[in-house]
């Protein structure tokens, strides 16, 4: 059994869905389970739509929804066998329209927001399942919300793994074993009482990995719009090279620090069973892609001690200067309790004798955080920053790397530098506007091109 996940650009339109069908046909003997994202940019469109509630502008809501619907209609028109699926998408969109119009004068609750955001996957999976059947494949549409039960943290829900494992074996496995092809949704789930949730942006990769682990798949294929995990985001570094292999840890570090190609949690469910993730380009399925697994040494690293460089923008640095932290204990606990209380994830941390710098991405509770930290010391905040991460198992054995990094990125100012405990990553903070240039200069330094 394999799990094959197709991202937004790999189901963007009729042509892309046609390619998906041929890819799955070529894997029919492997008992594939298909997981799809929403059509490219549809989740963004749905979130825009949801934000239009509260503006009172009914026309804007109608226009946005019509545009999203038209994307699906145009794909359905070109794909044989999709008219009944399109009818059910249109009926669901009509219901959504009624709900949104009724809510046009108020802001949606987080639960309602998830109900809107998850529509894209429900619609795309209907289309894909119908198109597969229309092309002669025995596809069965499966509603993942009956399998992937989560807590009620809307927008970033956590799945209940044991429930998922048990239900995936009951509801998905028999379909695949009977020679049929289940087609289901990434990104979405539901609470135990059936309220729809989402796993966070880019969460379809995570769904695929969870199902891969639950079904004890031989591999999880992530079909996307590039050849694999690369030495940098090719949108920033056009000469970036595709990696033949990477370790789970490397992939997780890169994803955590901005490599959008994988959701940061993707590797997590697969580590224990050692199930590989293979990233592949749906436009060029014959290319070998990147295999992410437990054996990072598969690839010779050449001259470079690092595997890849990533960056994440929209970072805020919170600094605390507290002379009394010197020689006291309990200070760090008090400090972290503030972030915990306000449910804000800390990315990078660097500490000196009497000061600490912490980076966060989510600024929604920043006022409360700075107020509470003010009780511990002097606090100042720097916005508009980016984190750069250099990742590779080779970092473990490479002394003097920091000097090389500083030289390469000069004259950009490096603000916080930190090396992860796993010693396979080095991260630092720069001004956001310097980010892309810094990535290019590092790529030049470590891979000889930019
Ligand atoms: P999908 O819709 O298939 O999930 P995403 O847009 O989420 O695709 O992820 C693919 C994109 O990730 C690529 O188009 C690329 O621009 C970006 N990306 C960022 N970092 C990397 C990297 N190190 N290697 C490859 N792609 C990367
Ligand atoms: N469609 C969702 C998003 O755009 C999930 C995904 O693509 O992985 O975030
Ligand atoms: Mg993605």
Image (cartoon, rainbow, N blue to C red):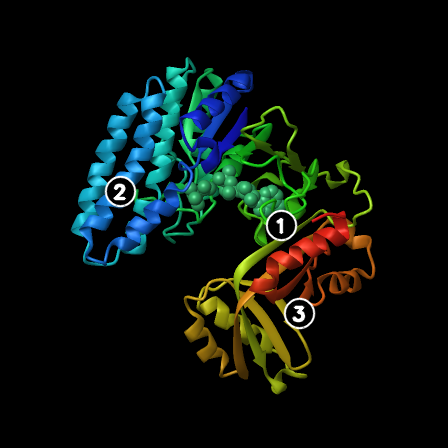
Where is mark 3, residue-wise? 413
- Dot 1 or dot 2: first in sequence order is 2
Question: Can you tell which mark lies on residue 254?
Answer: 1
366 versus 230 height, above or below: below
Q: Quadrant of residue 79?
A: top left
Dot 2: element? helix
Question: Can you tell which mark lies on residue 65?
Answer: 2
- Residue 18, visible in the rendered structure: yes
Dot 1: element? helix
User: Relative to the observer, which residue lies in front, 11 or 191?
Assistant: 11
Dot 3: element? loop
Mark 1 Cβ inside 8 Å of ligand 1: yes
Task: Give left or right: position of 248 versus 206.
Answer: right
- Residue 139, visible in the rendered structure: no
User: Do the residues under discs 1 and 2 have CB atoms within 8 angstroms?
Assistant: no
Task: Give left or right: position of 153 versus 431.
Answer: left
Question: Residue 53 at x, y = what percent?
Answer: 24, 54
Instruction: Report, in whole angstroms, how far the alpha carbon at label 3 lies from the one at label 2.
Output: 45 Å
Instruction: Report, in whole angstroms, how far the alpha carbon at label 1 lies from the one at label 2.
Output: 35 Å
């Amino acid at each position: 059994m394999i799990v094959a996940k197709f991202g937004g650009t790999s189901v963007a339109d009729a042509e892309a869905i046609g390619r998906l069908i041929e890819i799955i046909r070529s894997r029919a003997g492997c008992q594939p389970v298909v997981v799809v994202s929403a059509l490219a940019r549809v989740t963004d469109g749905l979130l825009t739509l949801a934000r239009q509630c509260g503006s009172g502008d009914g026309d804007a809501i109608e226009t946005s929804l019509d545009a999203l619907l038209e994307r699906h209609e145009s794909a359905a028109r070109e794909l044989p066998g999709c008219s009944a699926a399109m009818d059910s998408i249109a009926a669901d969109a009509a219901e959504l329209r009624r709900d949104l119009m009724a809510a046009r004068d108020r802001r949606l609750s987080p639960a309602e927001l998830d109900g809107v955001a998850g529509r894209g996957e429900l619609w795309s999976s209907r289309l894909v399942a119908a198109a597969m059947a229309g092309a002669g494949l025995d596809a069965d549409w499966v509603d993942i919300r009956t399998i992937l039960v989560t807590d009620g943290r809307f927008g970033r829900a956590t799945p209940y793994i044991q429930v998922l494992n048990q239900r995936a074996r009951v509801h998905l496995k028999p379909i695949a074993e009977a020679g049929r092809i289940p087609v289901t949704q990434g990104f979405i789930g539901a609470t135990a009482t059936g309220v729809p949730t989402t796993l966070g942006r880019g969460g379809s990769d995570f769904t695929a990995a969870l199902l891969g682990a639950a079904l004890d798949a031989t591999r999880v294929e992530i079909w996307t719009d590039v050849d694999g995990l690369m030495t940098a985001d090719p949108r920033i570094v056009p000469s970036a090279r595709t990696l033949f292999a990477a370790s789970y840890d490397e992939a997780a570090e890169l994803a955590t620090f901005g490599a959008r190609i994988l959701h940061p949690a993707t590797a997590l469910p697969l580590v224990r069973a050692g199930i590989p993730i293979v990233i592949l380009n749906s436009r060029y399925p014959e290319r070998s892609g990147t295999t992410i697994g437990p054996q990072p040494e598969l690839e010779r690293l050449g001259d470079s001690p690092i595997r890849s460089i990533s960056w994440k923008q929209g970072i805020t640095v919170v600094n605390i200067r507290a002379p009394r932290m010197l020689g006291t204990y309990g200070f760090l606990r008090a400090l972290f309790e503030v972030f915990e209380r306000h449910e804000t994830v800390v990315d990078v941390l660097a500490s000196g004798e009497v000061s600490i710098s912490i980076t966060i991405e989510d600024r929604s509770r920043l006022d409360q955080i700075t107020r509470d930290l003010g009780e511990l010391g002097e606090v100042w905040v720097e916005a508009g920053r980016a984190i750069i991460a250099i990742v590779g198992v080779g970092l473990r054995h490479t002394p003097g790397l920091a000097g090389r990094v500083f030289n390469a990125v000069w004259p950009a100012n490096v603000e916080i530098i930190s090396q992860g405990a796993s010693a396979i990553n080095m991260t630092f903070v720069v001004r956001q506007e310097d980010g892309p240039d810094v990535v290019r200069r590092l790529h030049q330094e470590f891979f000889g091109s930019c």
